[in-house]
């Protein structure tokens, strides 16, 4: 058994199911991290805005890879993730040591745009492009 090449991972539909499972696991991980009480909430960087941007960029890119290559799929990923980010901020208002912040939703939105935008670039350019 050989490992898939990067172009196979980005282009071949047979990998969609794998991307979908990974996407579901990421949703769960982000939800657990975001809804943990403030004193135990994990961070990846000195800025929670960067954490939001990174998490939602990864979620968006994985979502695009999990769905069909259509503009409507990208819009669906964007809508779902923006709603998820808003829900998280509203829910955090009820968690000890956490608070809702619309700046976090903005960081989520920027991450979604970055994640959705990077997949088509990777598919077209560099070592990830189909030969």
Image: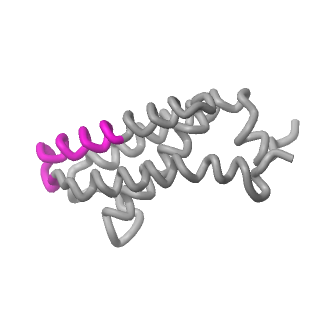
**Left or right: 90 with respect to 131?**
left
Residue 128 higher or lower than 86, as above or below:
below
Residue 125 position (above or below residue 9): below
Describe residue 78's horizontal placement relative to residue 115 as left or right.
left
| Towards the viewer: 99 or 81 | 81
State which quarter of the image contains the N terminus.
Answer: top right
Q: Is 53 on the left-hand or right-hand side of 88?
A: right
Residue 116 in the image, given as x and y percentages of width and height: 52, 46
Q: Magenta stretch: residue 83 in it?
A: yes
Chain part drawn in magenta? 82-99
Residue displayed at 18% across by 41% down: 91
Q: Give x and y (percent) for residue 74.
A: 51, 36
For the point 45% across and 57% down, the residue is 54
Whether residue 57 appears in magenta in the rendering, the answer is no
Task: Say left or right for 50 vs 17.
Answer: left
Colouring used for the render: one colour
In the rendered image, residue 113, in percent from the top left (x then y), is placed at 45, 51
Which residue sits at x=25%, y=42%? 86
Residue 71 quadrant: top right
Nearest the viewer among 87 and 78 is: 78
Q: Main secondary structure of the magenta part?
A: helix
> Could you tell me residue 104's position as x and y percent?
27, 56
For this orientation, the residue located farthest to the front is 71
Q: Residue at x 31, y 63 (%)?
A: 48
Q: How many marks?
A: 0
């Amino acid at each position: 058994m050989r490992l898939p090449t990067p172009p196979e991972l980005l282009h071949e539909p047979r990998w969609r199911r794998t991307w979908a499972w990974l996407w579901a696991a990421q949703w769960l991980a982000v939800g657990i991290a975001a809804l943990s009480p403030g004193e135990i909430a994990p961070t990846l960087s000195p800025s929670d805005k960067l954490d939001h941007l990174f998490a939602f960029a990864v979620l968006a890119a994985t979502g695009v890879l999990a769905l069909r290559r259509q503009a409507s799929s990208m819009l669906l990923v964007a809508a779902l993730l923006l709603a998820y980010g808003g829900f998280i901020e509203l829910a955090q208002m009820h968690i000890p040591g956490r608070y809702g912040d619309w700046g976090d939703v903005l960081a989520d939105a920027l991450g979604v745009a970055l994640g959705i935008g990077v997949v088509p670039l990777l598919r077209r350019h560099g070592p990830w492009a189909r030969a």
